[in-house]
Amino acid sequence: MNKFELILEEKISPIAQKISGQRHLRAIRDSFATIMTFLIIGSVFMIIANFPINGWEELQVKLFGEGFPQLIMTPVRVTFDFMSIYIAGAIAYNLSKRYNIDAFTVALLSIASFVLLIPFDAKIEIDGVSHVVPKVLQIGAWVGAKGLIVAIIVGIVVTEIFNLFIKKDIRIKMPPSVPEAVSKAFSALIPGFVIITLMLIVRFIFAATSYGSLLEMIYSLVAMPAQAFIGNNVFGAIGLSVASTLFWFLGINATSTLNGVIRPFWMQLQEQNMTAIQAGLTPPNILTEQFYDLIYMGGIGATLAVCIFLTLRSKSKQYKEIGKISVIPGMFNINEPVMFGLPIVLNPFAFIPLLVAPVVLIIINYYVMYFGIVPKPNGIYLPWTTPPIIQGYLITGSIKGALLQLFDMFVVMGIWFPFIKLMDKKQYELELQEDDEDDDFDFTL
C-alpha cells in the first residue's frame, strides 16, 4: 500500500465514517428516506395531473368533469404540502429509537411543538385589499418545504430535552400493575409539559419581533442565503459532487448523509418548480435533487459507462466478468459491484475520472437548462433506481431530457475511456503472464 492510500485509510477514512455515523445526521438521513415514500406517491399523481401531452388537462375535464384536475392533485397536497410536519415527527422518532426512549410519544410532541411555532394567521387579498384571517393553518407554506429547517431543529431539540428528563429520571412513575400504555403516558407528562411550555415561550418572544415567528427568522437569515449559495448555485453543486466523490472513493456511502443535509434546500426549490408548472409557468430552478439524478447515471461517478465498456470492450477476463455482473445493477443506479469489484474505491488511477465526470456533466446540464435548450426539472420525485433515459424524460417532462442523458453517457465514456482502457490493458497483461506461468508448470508424469 503506497503512502497516499495509507493516509486515506488511517487518517481520513475513520473521520469520514464517524461523521457518517453521527446520530443526528443519521436521524435526518433516515427521516428523509422515510418520507420519500410519500413524495414518490405524490409525484405519481403529479405526473398524472400534468402529463407532458398537449391537451391533457382538457381531456381530463372532458372524461371526468370540471373538478377532476383539482381532485387528482389532492394526493400531491397531502404529501408535498405537509412534508415539514412529517419530518418533525420522523426525526424525533428515529432519534428517539437511538436513545431507546418512547419514540412514538416524542414524535407526537415534536409535531405539536412544530405546529405551535407556526403563525395561525393567513393573509389574503380581495379586490386588491389585504385581509388577515385568524385561526388558519395554511396548506403548504410553513407546513410544506418552507418550514423544513425549523422542523429539523424542532425534531432534534424536542428529542434531546425529552431524553434529558428520562436520563435524569424526572418523570411520574406508576406502579408495575398499571398498563404499559398508561405508564408511558404519565411518564411523558413532565417532559411533555416542559417542552410545550418552552415552545409557547419561543412563540411569544418571536411574535413580539419584526419577524413575527421563529420560522420567518430562520428562513430569512439562514434558509434563503443557504438555498441561494448551496442549493441553487452551480459552484455549490460542483462542491457537493466533489465531496460525495471523496466519500465514495474512501469506500463510504455518505451520499445519503450529505443529501440529508442539503435536501431541505432542494425540496424548497422543487416545490417552487412544481407550483410554477401547476400555474402554467416555466420552473424557476435548475439544481433540484432530480438534477443530480440526471448526473449520476449508474451511481456516483456516472459509472454505468464503465460497466458498459467492461462488458463490451474489455480484454481482461476478470474485468469482463465484473462488467457483466455490474451492468444490470448499474442500469438501476446501483454501482457497488463495480466500485468494489474493479475496484474504483481507493484506486488512485480511477479517482480522476470518478471526480471529473460528474463535474463536467453538472456544467453541461446546468447551462443547457439555463439557456432553455432542455427544460428544467419539473419538481416530481422519482425513485433513485429509475433507469437513465427514462429518468431524463420524466424529470424534465420532455424527450429532450432523455436525449440529454444519452449525450451525457457519451461524454462520460469519453472521460472514463483512456483510464479504463489502460487499467484493462494492465490487467490483461497480468492475466497473460499468469497463464504463461501456469503453462510452465503443466507437465505429466
Image (cartoon, rainbow, N blue to C red):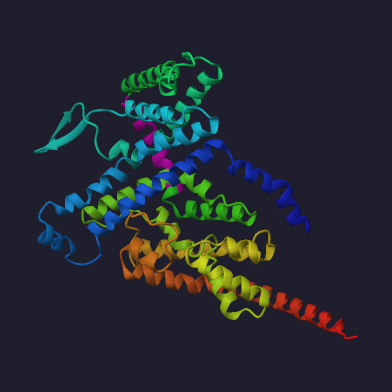
Above or below residue 437? Residue 376 is above
Instruction: Give the residue drawn at x 31%, y 22%.
Output: 207
Instruction: Give the residue drawn at x 31%, y 36%.
Output: 142
Identity of the residue furthest to the front in this view? 177
Q: Quadrant of the C terminus?
A: bottom right
- The percent coordinates of residue 380 (x first, y second) are 33, 55
Above or below residue 262? Residue 197 is above
Q: How many marks?
A: 0
Above or below residue 352? Residue 94 is above
Q: Which residues are magenta?
A: 210-230
Identity of the residue furthest to the right in this view? 445
Q: Which picture quadrant has residue 396?
A: bottom left
Q: Is residue 221 visible?
A: no
Q: Nearer the viewer, residue 71 or 400?
A: 71
Q: Is residue 387 left or right of residue 335?
A: left
Residue 228 within the magenta-colored segment of the rendering:
yes
Identity of the residue furthest to the bottom in this view? 444
- The percent coordinates of residue 371 (x first, y second) are 35, 64
Q: Which picture quadrant has residue 211?
A: top left
- The percent coordinates of residue 268 (x first, y second) are 36, 45
Predominant secondary structure in magenta?
A: helix
Q: Nearer the viewer, residue 374 or 385?
A: 385
Q: Quadrant of the N terminus?
A: bottom right
Residue 373 within the magenta-colored segment of the rendering:
no
Q: Which picture quadrant has residue 124?
A: top left
Above or below residue 251? Residue 433 is below
Q: Is residue 8 left or right of residue 328?
A: right
Q: Is residue 35 visible?
A: yes
- The percent coordinates of residue 333 (x first, y second) are 49, 62
Q: Is residue 175 left or right of residue 125?
A: right
